Amino acid sequence: MNRRLYLVCYDVVDDGRRERLSRLLESVGRRVQWSVFEVLLDRTELEALLGQAREPARFNAAEDSLRCYPLCAECLSGVRIQGQGSAPLLPNRPLVL
């Protein structure tokens, strides 16, 4: 299993859809900002997550936005956190929520 860190962020107009999407993301990752999550997944898990996230109960492509950014090892080494927050999730470190 080759997991990597992804940054997933969203802008969902509808309160109900937004809540359902946020609960889905909380089930697999860690919230780092109000609508930004870190998730540590392999490619298959990522595709399954994005498929679930795009379900109409959670997402409307005509109104909402969902973005997923892969973070490579070099990118992770450049992450800077100011103020509150934990270090980014790393593939060789267990997920701690």
Image (tube, rainbow, N blue to C red):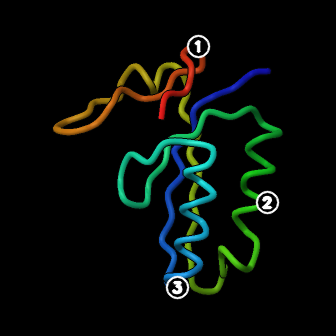
Residue found at x 78% / y 36%: 43
Q: Is residue 67 above or below residue 3?
A: below
Residue 85, picture quadrant? top left
**Residue underneath mark 3:** 14
Q: Residue at x 63, y 28 (%)?
A: 4
Is the residue 73 above or below the residue 42 in the image? above
Mark 3 and mark 1: span between their CA atoms?
36 Å
Tell me the amino acid under the disc marked 1: Asn
Determine the residue positioned at 59% across, 78% down: 17
Badge 3 density bin: few <14, some 14–19, many ≥20, Cα 10 Å: few
Please identify the quarter of the rendering in which residue 78 is found: top left
Which callout, 2 or 3, points at the residue further toward the start of the chain?
Answer: 3
Looking at the rendered structure, the secondary structure element under dot 2 is: helix
N-terminal of the two: label 3 or label 1? 3
Q: Residue 81 at what x, y percent from top left?
A: 25, 33
Pointer 2 residue: 51
Q: Are marks 2 and 3 in contact (CB under 8 Å)?
A: no
Residue 92: mark in rendering: 1
- The residue type indicated by label 2 comes to Gly
Find out whether the residues at labels 3 and 1 contact each other: C-beta distance under 8 Å: no
Where does the image place residue 57, in percent across and percent down from the top left? Answer: 70, 78
As shown in the figure, which amino acid type bears the numbered disc 3?
Asp
Q: Residue 24's spot in the image, x, y percent? A: 63, 58
Badge 2, how many Cα within 10 Å: few under 14, some, many 20+?
few
